[in-house]
Amino acid sequence: MIENKEHFKEHYLAKFSRLHGKDIHEGTLLDKYVALAGLVRDEIAGNWIATNNTYDQPHHKQVYYFSIEFLLGRMLETNLINAGLRDIAEEALHELGINLKELEQQEADAGLGNGGLGRLGACFLDSMASVGIPGHGCGIRYKYGLFKQKIVDGFQAELPDDWLKNGNAWEIRKPDKAVEVRFGGQVKVDCIYGKLVFIHEDYEPVLAVPYDMPVVGYKNQVVNNLRLWSAEAVHKDFDFSTFNRGEYLKAVEYKYAVEAISQILYPDDSNRSGKILRLKQQYFFVSAGLQSIVNRYKKKHESLEGFSDNIAIHINDTHPALCIPELMRILLDQEGMDWDEAWTITNRLMSYTNHTILPEALEVWPVEMFKALLPRIFLIVEEMDRRFGQEVLGRYHGNWQKARDMSIISDGLIRMAHLAIVGSHSVNGVSQVHSEILKDHLLRNFNLFYPGKFNNKTNGISHRRFLLKANPGLAKLITKTIGPTWIQESVDLENLLNCVNDPAFQEKVEKVKGQNKEILARYIQDNCGITVNTASIFDVHIKRIHAYKRQLLNVFHIMDLYNRLCADPNLDIVPRTFIFAGKAAPGYQMAKKIIKLINTLAVKVNNDPRIQEKMKVVFLENYNVSLAEIIIPAADISEQISTASKEASGTGNMKFMMNGAVTLATLDGANIEIGEAAGDENIIVFGLTVAEVLNFYQKGGYNAWDEYHHDPRISTIMEQLVNDFFPDSKEEFRDIYNSLLYDNDEFFVLKDFASYVVAQNRVDELYRQRNAWNKMCIYNIARSGRFYSDRTITEYARDIWRV
């Protein structure tokens, strides 16, 4: 074990020599990073092994968290911090003439996630390890991640995210733990000794090979596991005779078809082949993960007796919902259980988190596709649906409409949310309002049918990554002011309330924010060639580009402000820097148009001398965790402006709050709880409420043309989308224009516009009052402690997993 600086230097130099066979002065930054990561991995290896051995002892219930994505970010500094080596490493490397920050930059962000769903999974893994919960992640090892975003002439272009080109220093390949996953073929039913036996024949086999990554708890010697599965060909022999006949593609097509399963996250499913690939991915990691869990359990136990007492499996959104029929398959076909016994076990250990009410995100699969790809799983789902339907009919006295509404299979589609609800013992939402919408509206029938099954677990974030790591200046100030206990218990941030009226502390907080804005300004200059004023309000909107997240509403306010400045260049406003970042799904054309609009507007605004540097618009490409860690500490305003009822929770809102940004928000998702925590005077709220939005959806009564005709600002902006305001893009934004006016503005952008402008004017007024603004920032930091993932995970462990 490394105990001091000299010990660290000795081990690091030895590690470098063993890995690279040369003097450290001849090494590249990448060489030095690889050696450092290897040393850290060696240092935590003993705890990794010891933790796993402890979990295999009797009476240790283990949690397996299945998620299609884990947005980890860079791991070097996080692992150094959690292992208690950060300061020692920095000092030791400095004495060797090495800058730790430069080495950290050599690590690629792991291409394993996209947005809030994946980042939540990563925060939860960190918290499970840090609070000592025996919890493991299960996902896919994507070779190229989602995609690397480039902005070309204002448009999003997608490039492969080759994050593994230099390897992954944190992973260990475990070929001896590989399992086989089967696709296609037919199922033959036989009767042996009076019992039905299902035999899967003529299937396509795929080898699932696990790669394990350590998840290091904060200074507690716990190292949990993230297991990622890679798809490989079972038959790896090169087809020499086919190649020699000149059929070059055929010789390798099986291998490439198999490897496609773990190539990218979220393949475009606007076509049939993309849909099939997505379904393959979902079954692939579910089957591999469950086989691995059962195999591990059986090595330590003579039978599966007590399996549901010692194992908990969590389904993060509907992507892993096939855990339910796959476990049934294993218990029925491999373990020889009858249906009732297998169902009792499955239902007891499965739990499901719903993350959305958006219809397009509540997955459904065509029966014909599902049945052809997963014939045995389909038979199990079909039987689940039959039995559940009988139960509903029995409860509701033969009400066929009720049974149809709640069925798992309906109109030729398999409804994955219904599958997850029926097969789990617990279903939770991720904010108080989201959970209420699920219970009272979207899933009302199920809530009434299963009293007590639905519950709420408001999301949380890893404060150790997004404050301690991402904002070291603020973290040091907090520790100096109230002590270090907040690092383990972030609720202790409340002690900062004692300093909220202290002018000296206010000044220190403002100074840290200014330093962070300087860092972001340099990044913008270096990467975009845009000079921004660090005395301006940094108004930040960073998240996945989607119509319901309403980047358009933000853009329309910027256009209106620009119009006002053009009409009156002497208009008295606090200078603004509007910062956007986020990716659009490759097949989501409207989101891509929004990115183009932002960039087109940026060119117009940033190059107009009439507005006297009072505004700048910036779109930062390829948004990821590392970029978020630069942007969030520098933000003055946190844009959380989704249509009320549409954002399940949000976690970016919590990260901004914890770093002293003021939230500008609709009363949606966790924004409501942020307002309750910070106080009404420390958050800026606008727009329709959840009840008002739901009322419009259910009863109608909204006409976008009314907003157009009644508010000249709106009519001006709308026409600017399609006239010569953007001279090179006159018809480029016609689809946006049509969607808002002719398709009646599904997400109420125009309806909320006036209220949003009032809220933005309020931002301008408050920012001028520096003492009052700083007090708002401090209140937000102090009250953010309740939104930490350690708290959320503890609630999951206590109420759902029973760990």
Image: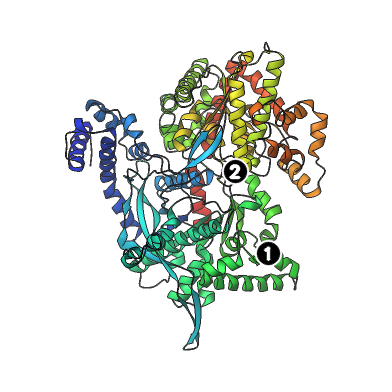
Query: Residue 19's mark?
Result: none
Residue 243 position by quadrant:
bottom left
Element type at mark 2: loop
Residue 361 horizontal/vertical position (percent): 61, 52
Residue 618 horizontal/vertical position (percent): 55, 27
Task: Please state which amino acid type lies under the numbered disc 1.
Answer: Met
At a point 78% along the width and 46% down the height, the residue shown is 695
At a point 34% along the width and 60% down the height, the residue shown is 56
The quarter of the picture where the N terminus appears is top left
**Whether residue 275 is situated above or below residue 773 in the rendered picture:** below
Residue 135 horizontal/vertical position (percent): 42, 53
Element type at mark 1: helix
Q: Which residue is mark 2?
A: 649
- Report the side of 292 relative to 14 (left or right): right
Residue 190 horizontal/vertical position (percent): 49, 84
Taking the view exactly as shown, the residue that stands out farthest to the bottom is 193
Taking the view exactly as shown, the residue that stands out farthest to the front is 246
Label whose residue precedes the other's in the sequence (2 or 1): 1
**Whether residue 779 is situated above or below residue 318 in the rendered picture:** above
Query: Residue 406's mark?
Result: 1
